Amino acid sequence: MATLEVDGVRAFLMVADHRSFTRAAEALGLTQAAVSVKLKRLEERLGQKLIERTPRQVRLSAQGEVFMPAAREFLAAHERAVQSLSAARRRFRLGIASHVMGPEVPTLLARLKSLDPALTIEVLLDTSRALLDSFEDGRLDAVIIRSDDDRRDGEILGPEHFGWFASPDFVHRPGQPIPMAGLSPCCLVREMAIPLLDRASILWTEVFVGGTTAIAAALSAGLVVAPFPRRLAPLDVVDVGDELGLPSIPSLSLVLHSSLSDPRSRESLRAITAAFREHRRPSSGPVCLVSETRKQA
């Protein structure tokens, strides 16, 4: 009977989850070569090909599909056995800025739990300033914010790109100000967007103000145009910047701040980094707005 190595099984599951040796290596804190070696040893022990790799894709073989559920159980059992020797459960306290919370968060939470089934995860959503205060006081282990919210160096998770979004059914009346939505007056995106419109001599009027979730709803309802992160834009809206001749909005960055340095915590931080880097909204294709003149025709 083949004897399994924990590191090999963990490498297999990372490759299977990420469908990428590069991302698996990043999440494990290893080189691609090291991940490949661990996977090869596992396959040799089992006498089965688990991962099929081509220049264009990485996917599970039929044997890999069969093996994956048992592999997860094996790794979870190993983690439970190790954790049983410790009286205290490990706790990870993560703060995420409300205007940063997005579709990658469920993935990163699942990855954190997969890495350590005995982990207790605390997630706090708040303003960046409140999260940074808690981080500085030691009440949070890590925080994820946008680069405009703090000038200290941190780990860049990826770019935050913006566009001018609206519903495909949004009606723009030629010669009339464009009805805009904006975040609270202290939001840098709003502060960037307004001068851009004014310098381009574009008529606009702010008709809706709210938080990220509220603006997303207003966009889907066809009420407004708004400068909005591509990563968070609802699936039923499109970028209308080119159609309306609106200026480009500079990109910012998503930043992770953490004071943790122990190996297990660093592993958790790598999982967070990988999750954010995987989720990116593709660029919108050509759009066709329902203009007032077309509508009357």
Image (spheres, grey):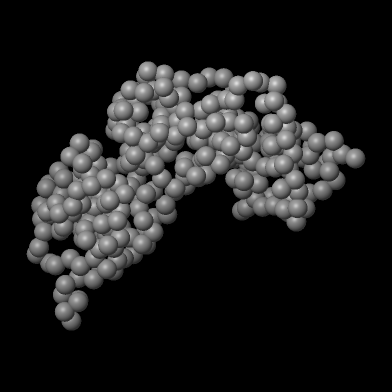
- Look at the picture and state if 171 lies above or below 217: below
- Look at the picture and state if 262 lies above or below 282: above
Q: Residue at x 67, y 26 (%)?
A: 83
* Of 125 and 166, the residue lying toward us: 125
Given the current orientation, which residue lies at the most extreme bottom position?
297
- 294 vs 160, left or right, is left
Q: Residue at x 75, y 53 (%)?
A: 66
Q: Quadrant of the N terminus?
A: top right
* Of 73 and 284, the residue lying toward us: 73
How far across and how far down the image is residue 198, in percent? 11, 48
How far across and how far down the image is residue 95, in percent? 41, 31
Is residue 163 something that shows in the picture?
A: no
- 164 vs 153, left or right, is left
Q: Quadrant of the C terminus?
A: bottom left
Given the current orientation, which residue lies at the most extreme right position?
1
- 265 vs 51, left or right, is left
How far across and how far down the image is residue 274, in percent? 52, 38
- Look at the picture and state if 213 lies above or below 111: below
* Tally of marks: 0
Q: Residue at x 15, y 58 (%)?
A: 178
How far across and how far down the image is residue 168, in percent? 29, 66
- Look at the picture and state if 279 lies above or below 272: below
Can you tell which quarter of the image residue 112 is in?
top right
Is residue 254 something that shows in the picture?
A: yes
Can you tell which quarter of the image residue 186 is in?
top left
Given the current orientation, which residue lies at the most extreme front position?
87
Q: Residue at x 42, y 52 (%)?
A: 281
